[in-house]
Amino acid sequence: MREFNYGKIKKQTWDSEILGLISAIYKEAGKQEMYLKQRPAELDKLVEIAKIQSTEASNAIEGIVTTNTRIRQLVREKTAPKNRSEQEIAGYRDALGVIHESFDAIPVTRNYILQLHKILYSHANSSFAGRTKTVQNYISATYPDGHTETLFTPLSPFETPEALDRICEEYSRVIGNAELEPLIAIPVFIHDFLCIHPFNDGNGRLSRLLTTLLLYRSGFSVGKYISLEAKIAKSKDLYYDALAAATDGWHEEKEDKLPFIKYFLGTVLAAYRDLDDRFALVETKLSALETVRLAANNKIGRFKKQDILDMCPALSLSSVEGALRKMVASGELSREGKGKSTRYVRLK
């Protein structure tokens, strides 16, 4: 079995792209600290939006879906789930809530990862909740002609508990001793976790929960206000391509983790820049119409009313609807479709 040590990574020389991404993330994180002090009310609204988007997107990546209305009911009102998909969505909601509230009291150990997995399946009658896998799993792809190919074979069930212990111990050691930049150590840990694939089910969703946890514990709390899961969902093909490119040779410890590290850093930076854009909408005292106009000017292609509501947390639903009507009437926007299918497109 692999050694799971960070010796090779620690000795690696990083290219200008990696160093530039890390530097930009630290710069944006510093700006967020300023926002935390200046605009606490708006931040609270962003937290609620991010929880909904994160829960919806992370489950949707795995094909677990429900309606927009039910997602909001499940996350905001904590209504009881009605079916298996909603049970899994509710479990993600609960696990994410624990991380938001208690990240500093959740050390990176196998036992705590098992507990998070148990919470993930706490609304479902699952025999494997909180237990490492009992059968060999495979990472496969199904092609348009219907045939399936195994892309990667994770560790065996027998090897998994020790491997989980090793990645947790090594990660905690290098972070605790400040031996490695956290923004490098986190994607390395997540990639190894996914290659181990320690559970019968829920590996992808738990990896995204762990990403949020590790970022929080290292002082990068952007995922609390901007959904990292939604960012990944929008670039799902790039996400899977980066994982696959970084997996070749993993069992022999000859893999190149750079593709996944770059994807991870790019995603985190994009989230911080989204946060910066959203604060630009609340930093100056604008009318509802001017705020919606500024938000719409940041959109490319078709967008929904909900997109504007998410970008303008200080505005009410009626204010956004009124501003959109005025912009359609003035010829700034065109409106397509009706009801839930309504989309807007900038004309100017």
Image (cartoon, rainbow, N blue to C red):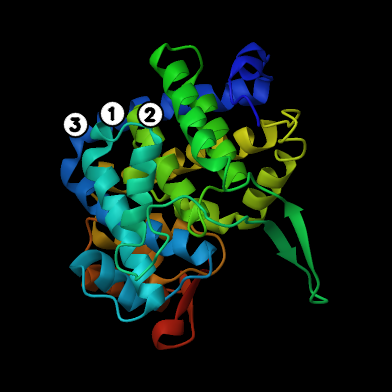
- Dot 3 or dot 2, earlier in sequence: 2
- Residue at (47% x, 70% y) in the render: 64
Residue carrying label 3: 37
Nearest the eye: 12 or 313: 12
* Quadrant assignment, res 213: top left
Characterize the local packing of mark 1: few (<14), some (14-19) or many (20 or more) Cα atoms within 10 angstroms. Answer: few
Residue carrying label 2: 29
Q: Mark 2 to mark 1: distance in Å?
A: 7 Å
Residue type at tag 1: Glu
Cβ–Cβ below 8 Å for labels 2 and 1? yes
Horizontal side of residue 202 vs 140, given as left or right: left
- Residue at (56% x, 58% y) in the render: 234
Characterize the local packing of mark 2: few (<14), some (14-19) or many (20 or more) Cα atoms within 10 angstroms. Answer: many
* Quadrant assignment, res 160: top right
Q: Position of residue 10 (x, y in %)?
A: 60, 14
Horizontal side of residue 214 vs 207, given as left or right: left
- Residue at (62% x, 55% y) in the render: 136
Residue type at tag 3: Lys
Is residue 63 shown to the viewer in this render? yes
Q: Could you say whether the residue bearing mark 3 is in a helix, strand or loop?
A: helix
Residue carrying label 1: 33
Nearest the eye: 115 or 295: 115
